[in-house]
Image (tube, rainbow, N blue to C red):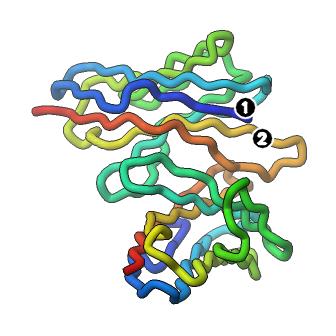
Amino acid sequence: GAVVSQHPSWVICKSGTSVKIECRSLDFQATTMFWYRQFPKQSLMLMATSNEGSKATYEQGVEKDKFLINHASLTLSTLTVTSAHPEDSSFYICSAPDRARGKLFFGSGTQLSVL
Amino acid sequence: AQTVTQSQPEMSVQEAETVTLSCTYDTSENNYYLFWYKQPPSRQMILVIRQEAYKQQNATENRFSVNFQKAAKSFSLKISDSQLGDTAMYFCAFMKPTAQGGSEKLVFGKGTKLTVNP
């Protein structure tokens, strides 16, 4: 079964509203998680690294105030898309490393559609 | 910065045949990891195979094998006995571990769409 759970699988929202996406490690602790964005027919691009108990590290060109990341526990990271606009419509995927097992797991992704 | 290049946007192969997907990368690092991920229509990322740069032996996983040429910075994926379920996007990816550990972020190529025909 899935060891990284991502919710929701898809969400439709109105322009100007905020949307929260959760990424949860189910059977291991993850002090670090990664958030990627994938536009249609394109590759995955790293947006930010989520660090438990400290600030996230954002990749160049990613707006911190637009994509709020919170990693308040060892098993949960959240990505909030604030004041969403149609250009934010994309597939968002998280990943989390299980360092004890030396493996990297991906969530199942969230399709965000902003109307 | 590391870059990963997949020069074949689309490939097709007949069922039971063999196909090779190309990947090249650019890095000044000596120690790193390379991966091939499969993304089927469900869009779930599935690890196909992984290669540590310090290992000379090419990784294999059942029908999947790689040709890792470190000096040429090439990392191709060979799929033998192709099956219909192999139809998917395939992404080559690079990871540079840090000395402190904890930097499992991946740099992906643009992907190759593989279609296996019956």
- At horizontal 45% and vertical 22% (from top left) the residue drawn is B22
**Label of residue A23 in the image:** none
Residue sitting at 52 percent across and 50 percent down? A44
Camera-side residue of B3 and A24: B3
Q: Residue furthest right?
A: B100
Image quadrant assignment for residue B12: top left
User: Which quadrant, please, contains the C terminus of chain B?
Assistant: top left
Task: Report how many numbered discs are placed on residues in the image.
Answer: 2
Does residue A34 appear to the left or right of B118 in the view shown? Answer: right
Q: Are marks 2 and 1 in contact (CB under 8 Å)?
A: yes
Residue with the mark numbered 1: B32
Residue wearing tag 2: B97
Mark 2 and mark 1: Cα distance apart in space: 6 Å
Please report, as a chain letter, where disc 2 is located: B
**In this picture, is B22 found above or below A110?**
above
Q: Nearer the viewer, residue B86 or A59?
A: A59
**Which subunit holds the residue at mark 1?**
B
Q: Give the quarter of the figure containing the N terminus of chain B.
A: top right
Amino acid under label 2? Pro
Taking the image as shown, residue B78 lies to the left or right of residue A46, namely: left
**Horizontal and vertical percent for residue A77?**
66, 75
Q: Position of residue A67 (x, y in %)?
A: 65, 73
**Image quadrant assignment for residue B11:** top left
Type of amino acid at the residue the image marks with label 1: Tyr
Task: Find numbered disc 2 in the image and state the secondary structure of the residue it sits on.
Answer: loop
Q: Position of residue A41 (x, y in %)?
A: 37, 49
At x 55%, y 67%, the residue is A4
Say whether residue B15 is visible: yes
Q: Is residue B97 above or below residue A85?
A: above
Q: Single out the residue that lies furthest toward the top.
A: B71
Q: Residues within 10 Å of mark 1 (few under 14, many from 20)?
A: some
